[in-house]
Amino acid sequence: MPTVIDATLTKANSVGLCGNHQDRWSCKMSDGTTRNLDFYGDEIEFSKDELIGKTWNQVQDLFCAKDIAYLQGAPVPSGSCITY
């Protein structure tokens, strides 16, 4: 499965729904494709190091883990993933 080999963060310039800014990580995959991870940077954040080397499914799992933790008010360790 392709993995993230590079990632570029773009901070939102405009205010989104309910005044939240939506940021984007553009992830270059090892198969040459690019995948985008959109998120609200005032709620959760990601580092480039957390994304590099992960498959897209692992990136999505990381997003879900961080989002759930934010909604529940619990901290999530850096780079954590949900296991099924």
Image: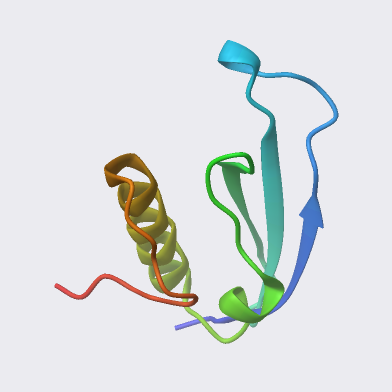
Residue in front for this viewpoint, 27 or 83: 83
Residue 20 lies in quadrant:
top right
Measured from the top left, where is residue 72 in percent x and y?
27, 45
Residue 30 lies in quadrant:
bottom right
Residue at horizontal 41 percent and vertical 65 percent from the top: 62
Query: Please, which residue is most extreme toward the top here?
Result: 18
Query: Please, which residue is most extreme toward the left here?
Result: 84
* Residue 73 in the image: above or below residue 19: below
State the count of labels.
Answer: 0
Which quadrant of the rendered structure holds the N terminus?
bottom left
* Residue 52 in the image: above or below residue 33: below
Measured from the top left, where is residue 24 in percent x and y?
69, 47
- Describe the colour scheme in one phrase: rainbow
Residue 82 lies in quadrant:
bottom left
Which quadrant of the rendered structure holds the C terminus?
bottom left
Position of 75 with respect to 23 (left or right) is left
Measured from the top left, where is residue 31 in percent x and y?
63, 79
Residue in front for this viewpoint, 41 or 3: 41
Residue in front for this viewpoint, 20 or 36: 20
Position of 32 with respect to 38 (left or right) is right
* Residue 60 in the image: above or below residue 73: below
Residue at horizontal 70 percent and vertical 73 percent from the top: 48
